[in-house]
Image (spheres, rainbow, N blue to C red):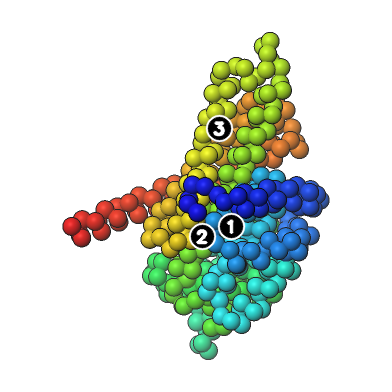
Amino acid sequence: MTAFSLEPEQLARCADLRALAADRLRPLAEKGEPGRVNRPLVTELGRLGLLRRLFTSGALDLCLMRESLAYACTEAETALALQGLGAHPVHAHGSEAQRARWLPRVSDGDAVAAFALSEPGAGSDAAALELRAEPDGTGRWRLTGEKCWISNAPEADLYTVFARTTPDAGARGVTAFLLPADRPGLTGTPLDMLSPHPIGTLALDAVPVTADDVLGTPDRGFRVAMGTLNLFRPSVGAFAVGMAQAALDATLTHTARREAFGGKLRDLQTVAHQVAEMALRTEAARLMVYAAATAYDSGAPDVPGRAAMAKLLATETAQYVVDTAVQLHGARALRRGHLLEHLYREVRAPRIYEGASEVQRAVIAKELYARTVEQESSS
């Protein structure tokens, strides 16, 4: 297997998953309420065994799942991804007791997980976290502060929460905690957002946590966060590629049928060239996503840079492709309920969450210069 081709069985699984999403998941998604956790949809993802694969598969399989689901049902894709994002730190860094308590429930779709990193003043700058974890003198901490833009909040059953345990230590003073939603002092408020999936704020008022709630090592939570993001950033790109492909296919069908100016839209060179550009960019993004995922699975040293490149290219590409598709469809694409109207709302957020496009460029540049310094020092 190379980064640039898929085996026949992988292609077959992707086709099966697209059909499954259209037949079994989309009807449940359509019954959901925008901005709320769709628990029947999450439960069905668990019943189908897709959530379990989050913890038994590699990065490439995660990307193929997200791309395939996004093509047919973005709500199902997002529900699956948020379960993985929220619970992956438990899978990768949790104690045996933490894993035994939560991973089966997350895998079954019985418990909804959330990744609580961003804050009102620390979104893309994760090292600037201000949520305080203050020792109470008994070997425990009290969490005080606010989290914002948290997917699945405030309805999740468990949160991976990142808090500052050492003041003025930057990234080195952050600890990851596994926080059940029923802890005293934890409240939340939903936010009314353009994107249809649930997003909210969390308020923590002296929420008690102990050493048993720590994920990994105290003051090393930034590694937990970045390790999770290095896995999920390429798969955000896969989500974007799935949306881009859906928009491209809809455009191919529309321009082949639509009569305009004495012929089909596809016969106009300007239209044909735009469609070709959409296809070119979509395929380039897909290949970069697969390459980044394969690098992650092989333990390559340049994963952070590759993951950033994949997310950046794919999300920017999807924005272009969906926008162009809307333009070629005309006003009909802006009617509520049209596929492209839905994709147009969905496609904007991935350029911001899990590190905005500007942050990805900064990561890429940092990795490039670090590599240059390393090469110079060894020569």
**Residue 29 in view (yes/no):** no
Is 11 on the left-hand or right-hand side of 138? right
Question: Residue 359: percent from the left, percent from the top?
Answer: 44, 50
In this orientation, which residue lies closer to the viewer: 98 or 349? 98
CB-based contact (under 8 Å), mark 2 and mark 3: no
Q: How would you rate the neighbour count of disc 1 (Cα within 10 Å): few for under 14, some for 14-19, many for 20 or more?
A: many
Residue name at image x 61 percent, y 74 percent: 179
Q: Secondary structure at mark 1?
A: helix
Q: Secondary structure at mark 2?
A: helix
Question: Residue 60: percent from the left, percent from the top?
Answer: 54, 56
Give the quarter of the image for residue 166: bottom left
Question: Residue 352: percent from the left, percent from the top?
Answer: 53, 48
Q: Which residue is mark 1?
A: 62
Q: How would you rate the neighbour count of disc 3 (Cα within 10 Å): few for under 14, some for 14-19, many for 20 or more?
A: many
Q: What's the amino acid at mark 1?
A: Leu
Is 81 on the left-hand or right-hand side of 73? left
First of labels 2, 1 by sequence position: 1
CB-based contact (under 8 Å), mark 2 and mark 1: yes
Residue name at image x 78 percent, y 49 percent: 23
Q: Which mark is residue 231?
A: 2
Residue name at image x 76 percent, y 57 percent: 41
In this orientation, which residue lies closer to the viewer: 218 or 97? 97
Q: Which residue is mark 3?
A: 278
Is 367 on the left-hand or right-hand side of 321? left
